[in-house]
Amino acid sequence: MTTKIPEFEYQRVAVGDVHLNVAVGGAGSPVVLLHGFPETHLMWRHVAADLARDHTVIVPDLRGYGDSDKPAEQDRDTYSKRTMAQDVVELARALGHETFALAGHDRGALVAVRAGLDHPDRVTHLAILDVLPTLDMWDVLHGANAAVAFHLYLMAQPPGLPERMIEGAADEFFAFFLDAWGTSQEAIPPEVRAEYLRASREAVPSIVADYRASAGIDIEHDEADRAAGRRMAMPVTVLQQDWGAALGYDAAGLWSAWAADLDHRTVTAGHFMAEQAPDEIVGHLRALLARQQSPTDPSGTRACATGPSCPAGR
């Protein structure tokens, strides 16, 4: 890797069965930032630099991505979001932090949601950028509109064919998403784009395994949480494009079933919002970090505090 976040220190940290490539900068209360597809930790370069003025900012490549280890898919757990969330908790602990705020984009956001559900005593604040929970994501895709998510169905197939198909035209495949999902070519400069394509080209089997898990074991974990009535207790901010209007669902309503203290915002910056509108994203993250955890209600979840961050009607 030749492109790095300026003034951040890089190291490889052992967590469980993998070593993660991680950039660390700043000082203060810890914030962990998780990247999406088809990107690496570099997607957070602008946001991380700003937050590092008064936070310790931890920016890893997820297992299977970037310059982190890419173990072979031994079983359904290898790339489950539960396993990847455990990576994040162990990474923070290895760097000296028992608790931390967490923000995730796209695939990293799914990992962040799982961390919030599995480790509520570790995650103090949670930001989710432009996804739905796995279970809801599959539920809202139907008819011709589901074509927008064709890659989900391709990579859900058993091992073999999807990997070979993508490897046959890897740069074209990954570049399609960088072009189709972006609203500004200037937001991802050529050297960063080249790094995304290199990293993705070298990680096809593990990227497919990550997506395959979201069509299997990740659904099972979400279903178990929904059946048990589990909700994320920490303050949660969700930033999304208006996919609800496009695909016919109530995004804020879906998220309120998972988060007791929710601030849901619709943004216009496009999918790669941390690169296309970093100042706006920093503003939302700083507002989240300033929120206090609400008191626990008798059901064991946290009641939404009064004020502008509380959804109407809650």
Image (cartoon, rainbow, N blue to C red):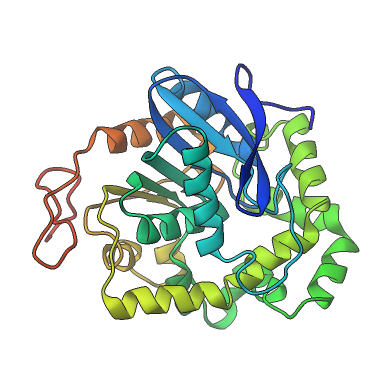
Task: Give the image quarter of residue 308.
Answer: top left
Question: Which residue in the rendered view is the most extreme toward the right?
Answer: 168
Q: Which residue occupies the foreground of this view, 189 or 69?
A: 69
Name the residue nearer the viewer: 187 or 261: 261
Seen at 83% across and 77% down, the residue is 161
* Relative image position of residue 312 (x, y in whole percent): 15, 56
Q: Position of residue 74 (x, y in %)?
A: 72, 70
Task: Name which residue lies at 65% across and 43% down.
Answer: 20
Residue drawn at 79 percent across, 32 percent down:
1
In the rendered structure, the answer to whether residue 196 lies left or right of residue 222 reads right
Above or below — where is 230 with respect to 172?
below
The correct choice, above or below, for 121 with respect to 186 in the image is below
Q: Going by the image, does 274 lie left or right of 38?
A: left
Q: Compared with residue 123, is residue 286 higher up or lower down, i.e. above or below?
A: above
Q: Nearer the viewer, residue 267 or 12?
A: 12
Quarter of the C terminus within the rendering: bottom left
Q: Position of residue 244 (x, y in %)?
A: 40, 65
Q: Quadrant of residue 149?
A: bottom right
**Left or right: 244, with 276 as reference point:** left
The reply to whether residue 39 is visible in this rendering is no
* Figure disc tally: 0
Residue 89 in view: yes
**Relative to 137, is 186 on the left or the right?**
right
